[in-house]
Image: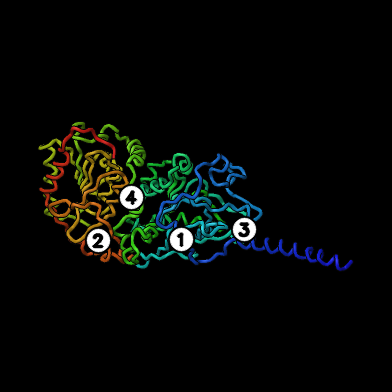
Amino acid sequence: MLQLLRPRRIWIVLIPTVVFLLVHLFAAKSSPHPVQSSRSSSRDKFVDQEVTFETPFYTNETRSTGLNSQGRSAHRHSFKWTNATDIPETRVYAHLPGFTVLANVFCVNGTLLLVSDRRDSFPDLKYILSSWKEVSGKTFVKEPTEDHIRVIDRKTALQILGISARVLRGTTWLLNDPTAYADESFSLRALRTHYMQEHRSRFNQSILPPTRILFPQISNKVQGIPLGLSSIPRLLFPSSGVGFKEDWHDYILLGRPIVIEHLVALDSAATSRSRRISTNAQEALGHLSVGSPLSVFNMIPAGWWSGWRNNMAKMLDIDAHSWQGESSSSVRPVVTYIFRQPNTGAVLDTDDHRQLIRNLNHLVDSHGYEVHIIDDREISFLERVKISLRTTVMLGTPGSGIMNAIWMHPSRLSLAIEIFPDNYLSTKQYFVIGTAGIKHLAWRGSQPLSETSTPLSQISESYLARANADIPPGTVNFLKQPIHVDAVAIVNYVVSWLEQDQGTEDEEM
């Protein structure tokens, strides 16, 4: 009898053992990744391409983030959970280096926490955020540390966050650039980020407009903040709040975890690390001064920006018919020369500057054009935008002045002419203005440059000259030197451009 029972006893022992081993093996494969700073090669696929991570087909119940499952009311500002599995995971909707759209981003003491049990679902964090520091007026930038941003699994999140978090509902725009690298193209960059997703019309409208716009690296007490940095968002989105470094510190001092429902994060230094920009660290830093973060995007039809341009015109009570369809056959062309002279930045030679003004003013009588000569220091922000909305051709030197071309109507005759010195070339405004659908022309001396879209790799000398992140824009020696321009040649070019054959109707770019 014992002989017959022995084989059965063996199977009784073996079967549970096999089951235990299989369960253990499965659990090991599906267990959360530990928090670590090591880089996963699987994340390389996120670095240099437009990526959408979520299906566009959401139900109304799951469209936002899942933070509404406990109900939503004017008095409910917290989200609670009882165990790790109830903590909402962070999701990445779209990403390019320096441009990232996320949902459910936690913040504790100023550190952004991306909560997920799948560590490889995120791009390398150095392509999302940077560490900025100002010392004695100089700006330094490094890759982020775990004090700035980190990925944690839900089990760790429960230990750090506790059982609840305050909720910042809606969409938060966060520009992580310091004053030295912030400019008025911020709103255009943030809105362009939303268009990374092909399914924007079905999904991304749910995270527009922004509820709040934060500049955590910029103090509202520091002089030299670009006027349009906060004015443009307020005009485009009147119900949105704008906060600076001091306001960000208020969130930090709460002493409680915060969960941001939707976050659009922009960081210029993170963009400069993209392999699309350069694999050389020095050139990457130089890109902060002579290049634009928008260079990582593909150019798309100008219609995407037209709605926001029209909204700005309505806010400023500009008659749309006065600036749409700018051509010699419909309304008078408007020529605008914008400058800031004298200045520590890029300025024209004094004699050339005066000659250019005389020649441009002569166009009023000789050709019937409307001409505006704008000193950027003596005109209000609103008046500057109003004129830009009606401008057909804009002229200016490298800097924030020529950037006003983003408000021009993109017609067949719309043109922005950027006047460069002999020893310097930048593609910063080329990408900014081009993203808004306006043609950009680089001018040097007495003639236009044949190649207006010169690759950044071809201006390495400019890179090297400005490759130190501690040099604020506008302090480089060759930009302190006056820029010479042939006033007669450039004005003749403007006339020939505006007097070209008018047989074809103006077309949207």
Residue at the image position 79 percent from the left and 63 percent from the top: 12
Q: Which mark is residue 18?
A: none
Q: The residue under label 2 is which amino acid type?
A: Ile
Q: Which residue is mark 2?
A: 459
Mark 2 or mark 1: whose residue is earlier in sequence = 1
Labels 2 and 1 touching (C-beta < 8 A):
no
Residue at the image position 85 percent from the left and 65 percent from the top: 5
Residue sitting nearer the eye, 275 or 232 = 275
Q: Position of residue 30 (x, y in %)?
A: 61, 59
Q: Position of residue 59 (x, y in %)?
A: 55, 40
- Using the numbered discs, state the Cα–Cα distance from disc 2 to disc 1 in whole angstroms: 28 Å
Labels 2 and 4 touching (C-beta < 8 A):
no
- Using the numbered discs, state the Cα–Cα distance from disc 2 to disc 4 in whole angstroms: 24 Å
Q: Which mark is residue 124?
A: 1
Q: Residues within 10 Å of mark 1 (few under 14, many from 20)?
A: many
Quarter of the figure with residue 477: bottom left
303 with respect to 480 (left or right):
right
Q: Which residue is mark 4?
A: 184
Q: The residue under label 3 is which amino acid type?
A: Gly
- Using the numbered discs, state the Cα–Cα distance from disc 1 to disc 4 in whole angstroms: 28 Å
Q: Which residue is mark 3?
A: 162
Labels 3 and 2 touching (C-beta < 8 A):
no
